[in-house]
Structures are given as C-alpha cells and as structure tokens.
Image (cartoon, grey):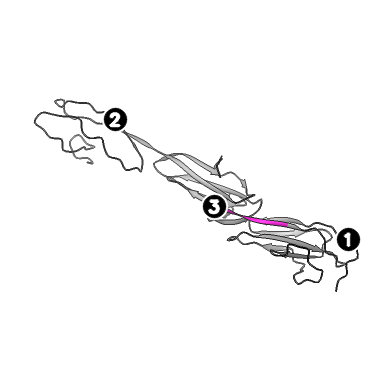
Amino acid sequence: VYTATATYTATPTITRNDYNTFTASESSAEYYFISKTQTTKPSASATGWSKTASQDVSTTAKETWYVWIKDSSGNVSSNSATITNYKVSLTAYAGTSISAKADSASGTNLASNTYVLANTPVYPTGVLSTGYNTLVVKKGNTTITNGSSQTITADTTFSSSATPNTYTVNFNKNDSAATGTMPAQILTYDASSTLTPNAFSKTGYVFDSWNTAANGSGTS
C-alpha cells in the first residue's frame, strides 16, 4: 500500500515514435499508467501501473490515451498527458490516383481511413492518368505541393483531381464538288460525345458517315 507524502505535480512528456506508437517519459517517474479510459488520477494501488512506457495505438479507430506517472515513493502526479489519433482519408477524382506515406516520403504506406497519431507527418502523392493534365492535390480545401510533408492535427482528407484533355475535330467535306461549311468541334477526353451532324451536301449523293481517313479506311 502506498501513502502519498508530498504534492507531486510532474507532467509526463509523450513522444511519438511513429504513426501508431508513442513513448511517455518523465525524469522522476518510476511507473506509468497508460489507459484509454482512465481520465482521472488513478490511485497508487490501482491495477495497471507499469514500468513500460510505450504504447501501440489503433490504426482503425479513434483513440485518446491518458498517461499518468508515479514516483519511487508512490506519489501519483496530479498532472497527466494525452495523445489522440486522427483519420487520414484519400480521395482520387477522375484522371488521378493518390497515395500517402507516414513519417517520411518513403515511409509506411497508408490505406484510406487509416488513423495516425497527432503530429504524424504524412506525404500525400497524386498521379495523373493518361488523357488528363494539371494535377491538383489538396488537404481539405487547401491546395498543397504534391508529395510534401503534411502534419496531421485533425481528421484529414487528401484529394487529387485533374483536368481532362480536350481535342479538336475538324470536318473535311473531302470533295471539291460538295458545298457547305462546318466549324470544328471540341471533344473532352473520356467523355461520351456525338459528332456534329453533317452539314455538307453534294447533288445526287447521300451522306453515309464520318471517317478518320479520306478513303473511308479509317475509324467511322
């Protein structure tokens, strides 16, 4: 049985080891009480005191961990420290893909909706798909530099988006005897479009179809 003999007010320090592990420390601490549920000062004789000061944290659910300390005389500090994890979500819009690494640009790959400890540096990287241009990577609603370090202090969504390429279709009447004009048509990559109806005409002939080759051997 421990009997407190003095006011003990030391505060533990929590150091993040990586995205899901932390260690507590304090020079006068002999024992640590690390818990997700002990929000108030535990008794000196409570079950759960340990000399182990490291803790793994869930990567699939939000958690807040409380750290209490006890000195060699059995005094429990009235001060504690806490650390929380936060969800990292990844959203890739059309024409892109996005991934994220934890702790360094070559660190652990994070799946979308992974929880990481507060102050974890995360490196989101977007990639353009064929047919798209102007990659934009965002943290929430703020545009960030692709692949840059982003410190997590709240639930965060990283997203990637891009602009589809556009193409110009020119219409050629392919016969000097035909009459009429047609303006060029702008088409967007990966978007279904219908070609402009034929506006050319030639006496005695009926329009059949468009073709990418003048002799009709191309794509109709």
- x, y percentage for residue 79? 80, 58
Whether residue 45 appears in this view of the structure is yes
Which stretch did the figure color magenta?
A: 82-87
Query: What numbered label is drawn on residue 7?
Result: 1
Query: What numbered label is drawn on residue 89?
Result: 3
The disc labelled 1 sits on which kind of residue? Thr
Alpha carbons under labels 3 and 2: distance apart = 42 Å
Q: Nearer the viewer, mark 1 or mark 2?
A: 1
Q: Residue furthest bottom?
A: 1
- x, y percentage for residue 117? 65, 55
Q: Residue at position x 88%, y 60% from top?
A: 7
The disc labelled 3 sits on which kind of residue? Ser
Q: Residue at position x 11%, y 33% from top?
A: 205
Question: CB of mark 3 within 8 Å of CB of mark 1?
Answer: no
Question: CB of mark 3 within 8 Å of CB of mark 2?
Answer: no
Quarter holding residue 45: bottom right
Q: Which of 173 and 198 is in front in this view?
A: 198
